[in-house]
Image (cartoon, rainbow, N blue to C red):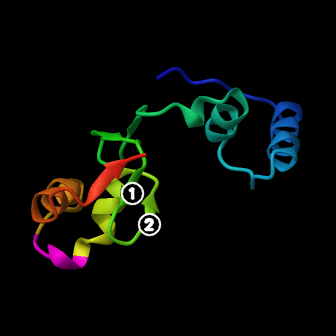
Amino acid sequence: MPVVRIDDEVMSELQKKAAELGSAFQPPNSTLRMILGLDKIPGRKVAGRFGSQHNAMSVKDTRTGHVYPSKYKAGLAFKADFPSIDKRYLWYATIHKYPGRFVEV
């Protein structure tokens, strides 16, 4: 991944733009993604904390109506059901235990 250095003036403008869009300032890359509209692309892949790819597609729990921002986050919500499973694999365990409960939105 390329590294881009930004100066104080650019950082200040990014902070202003984030405030105009009603968002708290996040790291520069996240703010640029928001400004460029890249954060709203369905099904985009984002690097996970563990170096693997997690699908960033939002999912809805059809039983409760709750919408999770990603499959990874939905899996984390059910961590108590799977105490011995590594959190990287919770989504897969969740959809096997509750088939048909989640839909992509």
First to last magenta residue range: 80-84
Q: Residue furthest bottom?
A: 80
Q: Residue at x 16, y 53 (%)?
A: 92
Q: Which residue is mark 2?
A: 66
Checking the image for residue 60, the label placed there is 1
Q: Is residue 34 above or below residue 87?
A: above
Q: Callout 1: 10 Å neighbours few (<14), some, many (20+)?
A: some
In x, y percent, where is residue 104? Answer: 36, 46
Q: Is residue 99 above or below residue 64?
A: above
Left or right? Give the position of 49 relative to 13. left
| Quarter where residue 60 is shown | bottom left
Q: Residue at x 84, y 40 (%)?
A: 17
Image quarter in which the C terminus is found: top left
Main secondary structure of the magenta stretch: loop
- Dot placed on the residue nearer the N-terminal end, 2 or 1: 1
Left or right? Give the position of 88 relative to 82. right
> In what element is the residue under mark 1?
strand
Q: Is residue 34 above or below residue 65?
A: above
Q: Residue furthest top?
A: 2
Q: Callout 2: 10 Å neighbours few (<14), some, many (20+)?
A: few
Kindly identify the amino acid type of the residue bearing the numbered disc 1. Answer: Lys
| Near-viewer residue (10 or 33) | 33
| Near-viewer residue (91 or 7) | 91
> In what element is the residue under mark 2?
loop
- Is the Cβ of the residue at disc 2 closer than 8 Å to that at disc 1? yes
Kindly identify the amino acid type of the residue bearing the numbered disc 2. Answer: His
